[in-house]
Image: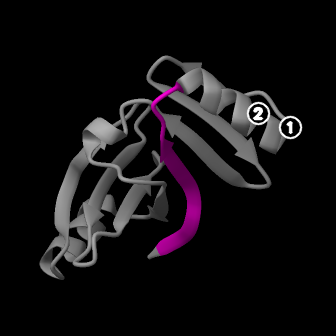
Amino acid sequence: MTAGINTIIYPVKDLARAKALFGALLGTEPYADEPYYVGYKDAGQDVGLDPNGHAKGMTGPVPYWHVDDIRASYGALLEAGAESLQDVHDVGGGRLIASVKDADGNLVGLLQDPTG
């Protein structure tokens, strides 16, 4: 089961320029501003900037589907023919992410927030 796409991560090469652009677009300061990730919240949407995204195989923005059971969803996508890009891993605070590539090269992200 999913809660829809609530997060999109953009791979960026110049974090300072990307922060300026998204700050102007969203009209807000980031809630997270680290050398490895910058995150904004706007209208219920989480928009992230990943300066290491290209090195992780991101070829463009990646939508992240919020799921209840990331391991089950990730396994189901692999069984359906997806190629693994990032195995399930914790990105801090118990938030789990993973990503796959479909047969057409589209990237699909999965995200599970900590429970309780």
Residue 116 seen in this snapshot: no
Q: Residues within 10 Å of mark 2 (few under 14, many from 20)?
A: some
Where is residue 46? Give x, y as percent: 63, 48
- Contact check, label 2 and label 1, Cβ < 8 Å: yes
| Magenta span main SS | strand
Q: How crowded is mark 1: few (under 14 residues within 10 Å), some or many (20 or more)?
A: few
Q: From the viewer's perspective, is 10 left or right of 45?
A: left
Q: Residue 7 carries which label?
A: none
Asked if 61 appears above or below 40 in the picture, the reply is below
**Total count of labels:** 2
- Farthest-out residue, right: 27
- Farthest-out residue, top: 35
Residue at 56% over, 54% down = 7
Q: Residue 23 carries which label?
A: 2
Give the residue type that dot 1 points to. Answer: Gly
Q: Element at badge 2? A: helix
Q: Residue 27 carries which label?
A: 1
Determine if the magenta segment contains residue 12: yes
Q: Kindly indicate the quadrant of the structure image that contains residue 80.
A: bottom left
Where is residue 32? Give x, y as percent: 61, 26
Give the residue type that dot 2 points to. Answer: Gly
Residue 107 seen in this snapshot: yes
Q: From the viewer's perspective, is 2 left or right of 75?
A: right
Where is residue 23? Give x, y as percent: 76, 33
Asked if 78 appears above or below 69 in the picture, the reply is below
The magenta span reads: 2-14
Where is residue 83? Give x, y as percent: 16, 66
Residue at 72% over, 28% down = 20
Q: Element at badge 1? A: loop
Determine if the magenta segment contains residue 8: yes
Q: Kindly indicate the quadrant of the structure image that contains residue 106.
A: bottom left
